[in-house]
Amino acid sequence: MDILIKEFMAKIESRNAHEPEFLQAVQEVAESIIPFIEANPKYKKHKILERIAEPERVISFRVPWMNDAGEIEINRGYRVQMNSAIGPYKGGLRFHPSVNQSILKFLAFEQVFKNSLTGLPMGGGKGGSDFDPKGKSDNEVMKFCQSFMTELYRHIHADIDIPAGDIGVGAREIGFLFGQYKRIQGEFTGVLTGKAAEYGGSLIRPEATGYGVVYFAEEMLKTRGESISGKTVVVSGSGNVAQYAVEKCIQVGAKVVTMSDSSGFIHDPAGIDTAKLAYIMELKNVRRGRIEEYAKKYGCDYFEGEKPWKIKCDIALPNATQNELDAPDALLLVQNGCFCIAEGANMPCTLEAVRIFDAARVLYAPGKASNAGGVAVSGLEMSQNSLRISWTRDEVDSRLRQIMHQIHEACVRNGRVDGDFVDYTRGANISGFIKVAEAMIAQGIV
């Protein structure tokens, strides 16, 4: 089996040289799916995995705009339309200096499996730009978004490709993007998700990814007769996902002791309560400050340039960015008694870190399962837009809980190995693969 995986990856590497993030994502899936394909030859005959690993379309374009000093700036925009077998392309837009084709292909590839797991009719895609919204005025962000959408609009539609937000793309950016799309196309349609409630957005959408991570962690803990209440939780990140994961942890009685940003992390042994979280939300969402300010205000430790994985905990929620948790971090977590890890970011744990978690038989959930709550509620927003209705907060939250429960059940069904141990990576990959594969076979060689 190792030989088959190596042969497959050699072909992928030959076609995608210099794309390490994409190759990492494909490797992680191949290790689960190739043994499954060998046991189910029809998928091998149709070369389904090879086809899923090749984007249906990759779009790259220039984004010129003018800053407040009257100088012309030029960024690069992308949209990767990975797979539309089970529905229109669905996936976020990321605005960050690190954005390149490799990162967006990895995210789009993961999105195919994640969207399939939700049970909703959504294909996989991802897009974005190397534009950095940090330090930019609202006027500069608007000008960039308008220029970006002036090209992107050609490739998206409510029945073709429905982008959402991601890192660097929040309510402000979605608003500017939607306004420009509406201006160009002259139609008010659900072409973007993550919109404000005033113009077609769904309640719970901002909270969905963070809430969903905690809901999934709760499902995993139930398999061992445990509860998240009373547990100590280490969280990385301080953006949207981290904020609402912390909020939900507080609501269910857990104690969160860390949050971080790109400069370092804070450790508050007393726990981040509702008032402290409100301060962080104001700091990050309004003032766009650094997490170090929290440490100064509340008199706790700040670790500059470090990650929070050395802090003793029961549960770890990596919510920042890809590959933020490596093998030494994983060893520290396991040695310090952490027994549950649920990814809020996309691929925040390296392959080596995941192997350490599996060897230690701790509960580990890959992002394609545990952070699917965001795209799930995006799918619910699409439904509400199509029906021209708005569901209540409780209705959306109930549907979100049910979707996360169903994803967990699918992971358990296809991931149980060695008696009671559940390999959630294997379960998520196989569960997501089957639905897409069956749709691709039914639709022929397209």
Image: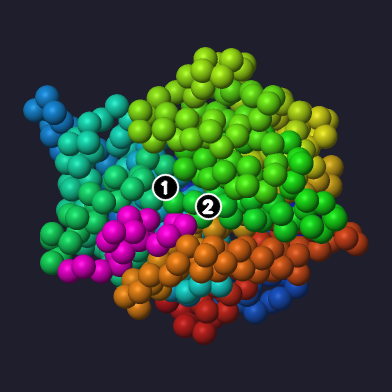
The amino acid type found where label 2 is placed reads Thr
Per the rendered image, the range of residues in magenta is: 187-205
The residue positioned 66% from the left and 61% from the top of the image is 428
The amino acid type found where label 1 is placed reads Asp
**Label 1 to label 2: alpha-carbon separation:** 11 Å
Which quadrant would the N terminus be assigned to in this image? bottom right
The residue positioned 49% from the left and 51% from the top of the image is 207
Which mark's residue is nearer the viewer, 1 or 2? 2
Residue 209's disc is: 2
204 falls in the magenta region: yes
- Residue 431: tell me if it is visible: no
Quadrant housing residue 288: top left
Q: What element carries label 2?
A: helix
The residue positioned 79% from the left and 57% from the top of the image is 222
What secondary structure prevails in the magenta region? loop
Residue 415 point in image, percent of width and height: 76, 63
Q: What element carries label 1?
A: loop
> In front here: 291 or 61?
291
254 left or right, relative to 262 = right
Quadrant housing residue 313: top right
Give the residue at mark 1: 166
- Mark 2, Cα crowd under 10 Å, few <14 / some 14-19 / many 20+, is many
The answer to whether residue 32 is above or below residue 290 is below
The residue positioned 34% from the left and 59% from the top of the image is 197
Residue 328 point in image, percent of width and height: 72, 28
> In front here: 352 or 271?
271
> In front here: 255 or 338?
255
